[in-house]
Amino acid sequence: MPEDFEATEKHTAGDAAADLRPAIILVEPQLGENIGTAARAMANFGLCDLRLVTPRDGWPNEKARAAASRADHVIDAVRVYDDLASAVKDLSFIYATTARDRDLSKRVCGPVQAAATMRQFEGQGGRVGILFGRERWGLNNEEISLADEILTLPVDPEFASLNIAQAVLVISYEWRKAGFSEADGGIPFQTPERSLPATKDELVGLFEHLEGALDDVTFFRPPEKRPTMVRNLRAILQKAELNAQEVRTLRGVISALERRHLRPRDEKGNKPASAPKGDSEKQD
């Protein structure tokens, strides 16, 4: 996405408390820049409830606001808590994110499964929260024990660590995608409708025009291969599913090439200067 991409949904701080969308909870985040980029990732996909548990550098944090790149509605709605239990007390279901096996008897799921469950809770009026740990070592087992399920991403086990904002972005994206039908996929704009295809008569006219021009320059060699070459050319053009305007454009191109063959021009499109009358005559 370009730097000036803006989320289309705007939310106020008051919306965050009543909203059923998932809450993103960062536990003891260290860098304001990471908080800001996480906020930006949330805004890109329509989330706005960002909660911080004892951020190292306090709150508010101007570095976070700058890194959020105009996701001010998320930054302005941030709520800060002294402990994790307070941050999750209004939530019905909690995911704890981790990249490694914690040997805990909790169900483990991926982002697609989690996103579907989040949407189910929303439909029932429940709130879901997603816990993200510290930049250096994530969540501890006691914090994970507060969660209902573990959420992990299908990363390369040889390099499993993600930046907080990257992890927030992946999960926010899956949550948003889960809210759309397979037909539209949630994309913000669609391919323009195609014009009606050219009629068969228009296509045959193009074929014959092109074939005639190629005959003039003896393209079909040897002559006995002409039928096969013509069939191949027609198949190529038919695959393009040309509309009437495209057929007219191609015929214009062919006509221009035919005229150039009759009246050659130089590289700049200029006609060559006429030779003096006597120069073209053979001298004895």
Image (spheres, helix red, strand yellow):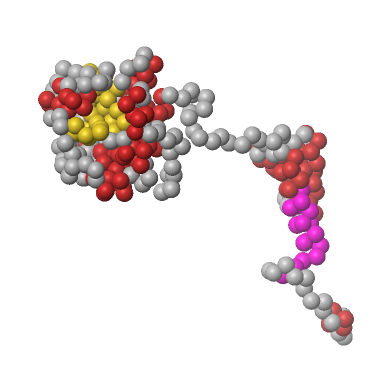
Please tell me which residue is depicted at 75% across the width and 40% down the height of the picture.
Answer: 244
The residue nearer to you, when weighing 28 against 190, is 28
Toward the top, the furthest residue is 124
**Image-based side of 124 in relation to 253, left or right:** left
In the displayed structure, 172 sits above or below 120; it is below
| Quarter occupied by the C terminus | bottom right
| Quarter occupied by the N terminus | top left
Q: In which quarter of the image is residue 155?
A: top left
**Image-based side of 203 in relation to 95, left or right:** right
Residue 17 painted magenta? no
Q: Quadrant of residue 79?
A: top left
The residue nearer to you, when weighing 256 against 52, is 52
Residue 231 horizontal/vertical position (percent): 71, 38
Please tell me which residue is depicted at 21% across the width and 45% down the height of the picture.
Answer: 31
In the displayed structure, 17 sits above or below 92; it is below
The residue stretch that appears in magenta:
251-266
Toward the bottom, the furthest residue is 284
Please tell me which residue is depicted at 37% across the width and 19% down the height of the picture.
Answer: 122
